[in-house]
Image: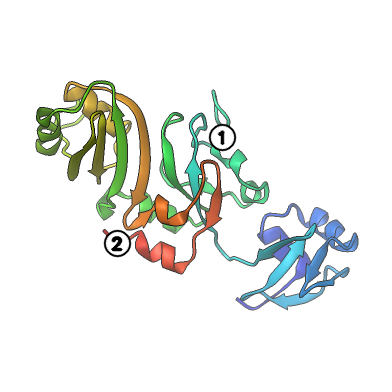
Amino acid sequence: MGKMTLDRILQSQGFGSRKWCRQLIADGEVRVGGEAVDDFRTAFETDGLEFSVFGEDWRYREKVYLAVNKPPGFECSRKPSHHPGVLTLLPEQFTWRDVQPVGRLDHDTTGLLLLSDDGAFIHAQSSPRRHVPKLYLATTAEPVTGALVDALLRGVQLHDEPAPLAAQVCRQVGESLLEIVLEQGKYHQVKRMLAAAGNHCAALRRTAIGGLGLDALALEEGEWMFLEEEHLALLAAE
């Protein structure tokens, strides 16, 4: 990655405009290796660089990959209309970095949500050609029946789809609880499939994407974390 001046480093990491970052440095709010740096022209190797701003530690990341355990009541949009945006759960610099959700969860759907400022990653994860399996835990309005499970596995016809859509996996795990694995990622797909099969979705939670499970990340609702290489590798695993 090479060397960059400290003001450019801070700007690239989302800490504000170049002018604001220079002011932070001049005010002694930025430390590298535990030492305050007050000259914005000081250059550092970015690879593995660790620094602090306002006493909070950060590591330089050319691109960021994040996981959020999304609570209910948040919209997966940079311009939310009826509910707070999911980006309000993150530090402000991620908005400056143009971090975006990878796909969407409805405002009342909870669970694993990925975010990134890497356009190629967002496109690849969102592409239907990749057939990334996503695991959902659906609470149904009426008790689950064997006929419901069979219908979801065979495929149900949605009014705006040319062919029936089927769950890759569907199993009952409670009286009114289903585990459903989908690959397509259509709009409101789980809810619409349940309705088409004669039931309704009372609550929905996404618990895994590929081999990346929310339980292993140990995130409470509303918490976020950086995804490292080992996490990203799991996204391709089934």
Residue that mark 1 sits on = 85
Residue 80 image-quadrant placement? top right
Residue placed most toward the observer, 67 or 41 = 67
Residue that mark 2 sits on = 237
Label 2 Cα crowd, 10 Å radius (few <14 / some 14-19 / many 20+): few
Q: Position of residue 224 (x, y in %)?
A: 55, 50
Mark drawn on residue 160: none
Left or right, 86 with respect to 155, comes to: right
Q: How is the image coloured?
A: rainbow
The type of residue carrying mark 2 is: Ala
In primary-sequence order, the first of circles 1 and 2 is: 1
Residue 130 appears anywhere in the view: yes
Work out whether 38 lies above or below 82. Answer: below
Residue 177 image-quadrant placement? top left
**Which quadrant holds the N terminus?**
bottom right
Left or right, 144 with respect to 221, comes to: left
The residue that appears at 59% across and 65% down in the rendered structure is 61
Q: Position of residue 23 (x, y in %)?
A: 86, 57
Q: Position of residue 119 (x, y in %)?
A: 47, 55
Q: Mark 2: which secondary structure?
A: loop
The residue that appears at 46% across and 30% down in the rendered structure is 107
Work out whether 187 lies above or below 34. Answer: above
Q: CA distance from mark 1 to mark 2?
A: 29 Å
Residue 159 appears anywhere in the view: no
**Which quadrant holds the C terminus?**
bottom left
Label 1 Cα crowd, 10 Å radius (few <14 / some 14-19 / many 20+): some
